[in-house]
Amino acid sequence: MKQLIKLGVISALAVTVSSAALAQARTLDAVKQRGALNCAVNVGLAGFSNPDDKGNWTGMDVDYCKAIAAAVLGDPAKVKYVPTTAKERFTALQSGESDVLIRNTTWTLGRDSSLGLSFVGVNYYDGQGFLAKKALGVSSAKELNGATVCVQTGTTTELNLADFFRRSKMTYQPVVFEKAEECLQAYQAGRCDVYTTDASGLYAQRLQMQKPDEHIVLPEIISKEPLGPSVRQGDSQWFTIVKWVHYALLNAEELGVTKANIDQMMTSSNPEIRRFVGVEGDFGKGMGLENDWAVKAIKAVGNYGEIFDRNVGKGSRIKIERGLNALWTDGGIQYAPPIR
């Protein structure tokens, strides 16, 4: 009898282990079977995810979608973009409509623990700021006592705004909208004195105005906004894949591996580069990928520095300084574990 019970326990454990293994592999398998990555992005934010009139998407977050698709499917074009508002973004991931959320979303404890998702890293270190008309005559957020403020609902921005004014012992009147473009339109129409969101968004949206020089981004940064990709909890294999695509983009920049020289790097004698390009070691196998997964990602979009400069940095209209988003070797805090 005891032996039968013991066998039953072992059998149950085997089923549990088997189920867990299947659960871990389900997203990768689904993506491969579908032949496309479903990637949730912003409905439209210049420099990060923005469609043109032909439906072609560009931006820093879009390049991350392409890098993942290239690493997993071998083709950066095999992406179905799922445009989401701030209110819709988590549901799109939780429901399985998207495989990954890469949409200027702040990593917080609450989101990491109670929404059923996990952040894989930070692809852009940001902070919340304020956009004001020069005609308002203010040069600091500390001068905004009694101001009306346009803000997007369902975001950490809304909470940070309340905290800032409370800390500063000032009053304000929120003017709340669901979509970022509604906030911007209301601000331009004079329905509020200032508009608040992540500073990266302010710089991008300022360029969309008819007379951008009539507006200034105030100097204060009132919050920490680590933005990064997230995936559903319970799928460690998929979490590892998305995480290491991000780390590969950073490691490539640090190693001097670019979209232009990736082919010649295949014959490098540098052991770190040889592991990176997959000619030494077997580092793709553990993730369920080919060993040249990182090569495919870099061929598709370049390294992290190339992605940053092209979309939001010196090579773009936005021209945001690298700042905290520089590599740790260049005074920033972007840092990736090694491939070994």
Image (cartoon, helix red, strand yellow):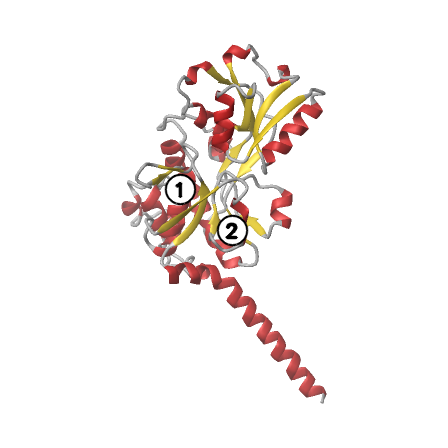
Q: How many marks?
A: 2
Tell me if residue 173 comes above or below residue 329 in the rendering.
Answer: above
Residue 315 at least partly seen: yes
Task: Tell me what residue is drawn at x 55 percent, y 10 percent.
Answer: 137
Residue topped by disc 1: 62
Decide: is 207 above or below 124.
Answer: above
Q: Between residue 269 and residue 29, name the one nearer to us.
A: 29
Among the two numbered marks 1 and 2 on one chain, the one whose residue lies closer to the N terminus: 1
Q: Position of residue 284 (x, y in %)?
A: 41, 58
- Residue 25: x percent and y percent? 48, 63
**Which residue is at the front of the view, 35 or 182?**
182
Residue visible at 41% across and 32% down? Answer: 46
Q: Secondary structure at mark 1?
A: helix
Mark seen at residue 93: 2
**Number of residues whose C-alpha sits closer than 10 Å to that of mark 1, classed few (under 14), some (14–19) or many (20 or more):** many
Q: What is the x, y in percent for residue 305? A: 40, 35
For the residue marked with disc 2, what is the amino acid? Leu
Residue 180 image offset from top left, x and y in percent: 50, 32
Residue nearest the observer in this picture, 273 or 18: 18
The quadrant where residue 311 appears: top left
Q: Residue at x 62, y 17 (%)?
A: 144
